Image (spheres, grey):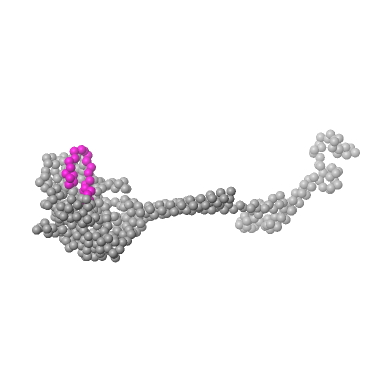
Amino acid sequence: MKVVKIVITVFVAMMSLFICLLSAAIFFSETDYLKYEADGHTEPIITSAEIEYLGDEYHGESEDGFSYYRLYVTIENHSNYNHNTSSVYLHYDSSAYGGNDWEYYSVMPIEEEAFGSDEANCIPAGKEATCSEVLCIEDGCRGFTVTYNNYRTDSEQTIEIDL
Amino acid sequence: MAERNNDNFWESNDDDFWSKPVASDDWLKSDKQSAETVSDSFSYQYEANTAVREEAVNPYLNRDVSSYSYETQQSQQPVRETVLNGQVLEKPKKKIHVHTIICLTFITIAIFSIIGAFASYSMAKKSAIKTANQVSYAEKEADHVFFFDEYNEVAFAENAVSYVSEENFTGFPKEQKLIGIYLEVNSSKYITGANVLHDIYLGYEIDGRPYYQEIPRRDVIYPYASSQGFAREEILESYGLGNGIDDEGYLFFFVPMQVEEVTLYMPKTVKENYIDVIETVYYVSFPVIEDSKEAE
């Protein structure tokens, strides 16, 4: 009986120590992940968005029923991390061309990355940055929205642009 | 005699037999004590003995303790409880469950360590998020040759050079040009976890508006750079340079055609609250010139 008690005591002690070590290990492994957690809780703010009409032709290219615009979006970053514009989207209620790939969209409504992802504009820590993009928008499109999605905090900022 | 008959138990039919005092029985008279007296005597003796013993155990017991303090009165209670039926009861020996105590101690430690880990992580996360949302770095202009830190020396070329544009590469992004900045990093020591020349970005202005660019991925740059004779290894990426390894190559960026001056920003970070915090941002400015080979 005494042996059984000792065995149980030792087992409980070992398990307790194991749980202590496991807790410490989990804590320290999770602290490595804190950088991403903290990064996810920093959020650039779209301060303004403007649209400039460029005309029916841009660099010798034109298409019937479409016009060219340049979009300017100003974003502030009050955090300690650099961000980029890959999470800024445009939502059209009409068909439009977008970006440097000149891909034609015919389905309504349209969502596309505002500034592409390969050559993403940087919004440095503690700075305000401007991002611009030439857009080819179908005549008759009344406007669109510029949206910044933060998928980590599940928040969204939207600015409406009227044409 | 009649009285005696009346007292005869077996012959008596007296209805009030049970109501007569037993003390009148003769056999009891010899003892000069009635049944109640005996009973009282026992009771008296018992209480007397008990009192003596209780007094021995606790001198306060049979005294008027109402005048004593509450603590003193309370302190007498357990002792009184041990005295019963004239005997001082021995307290049962407490059995010390050593194994149970050890097990409970370890289980408590385990539970507290889990709670502690969760609480610590929660606090660390809170402070990390707070730190991440505070900007407190200084910008310092650096020379074209400077020490990024104690062990890493960085040397830039004097100019940023425009290598590719629509003019020399069909299908190149409109109104853009690819510029390259040559640099060498001489590193004397590797430090674990150190971020040297990490998250570099480029800045320029157009019509008074500030623009910033990250270093594009090597795969994006390579088709254009290779057309100008650059090897893949010469295209540097911003995942960290130096830190124990000497690096040499070009940082390429896409910039609008009208850009004539660019500034390269190099954040230097320190660990604070488990996260990397920007301490200093070094910057170097470069005029953008055309590629001399192209010009020729």
Q: For residue B71: magenta?
A: no
Indicate the position of residue A113 as horizontal and vertical percent values: 22, 46
Which residue appears at 72% of the width and 53% of the height?
B50
Indicate the position of residue B278 as horizontal and vertical percent values: 29, 59
Residue A74 appears anywhere in the view = no
| Above-or-below relation of A121 to B1 | below
Question: Exactly how many numbered labels are in the figure?
Answer: 0
Indicate the position of residue B135 as horizontal and vertical percent values: 29, 58
Quadrant for the C terminus of chain B, please: bottom left
Decide which of B154, B187 is in the foreground and name it: B187
The quarter of the picture where residue A24 lies is: bottom left
Quadrant for the N terminus of chain B, please: top right
Residue B168 appears anywhere in the view = yes
Q: Which residues are magenta?
A: A98-121
Magenta stretch, main secondary structure class? loop
Q: Which residue sits furthest right?
A: B1
Indicate the position of residue B292 as horizontal and vertical percent values: 12, 59
Horizontal side of B84 relative to B290 (left or right) equals right
Decide which of A90, B223 is in the foreground and name it: B223
Decide which of B50, B125 is in the foreground and name it: B125
Which residue appears at 43% of the width and 52% of the height?
A22
Which residue appears at 86% of the width and 38% of the height?
B8
Horizontal side of B133 relative to B172 (left or right) equals right
Decide which of A150, A33 is in the foreground and name it: A33
The quarter of the picture where residue A57 lies is: top left
Which residue appears at 13% of the width and 40% of the height?
A65
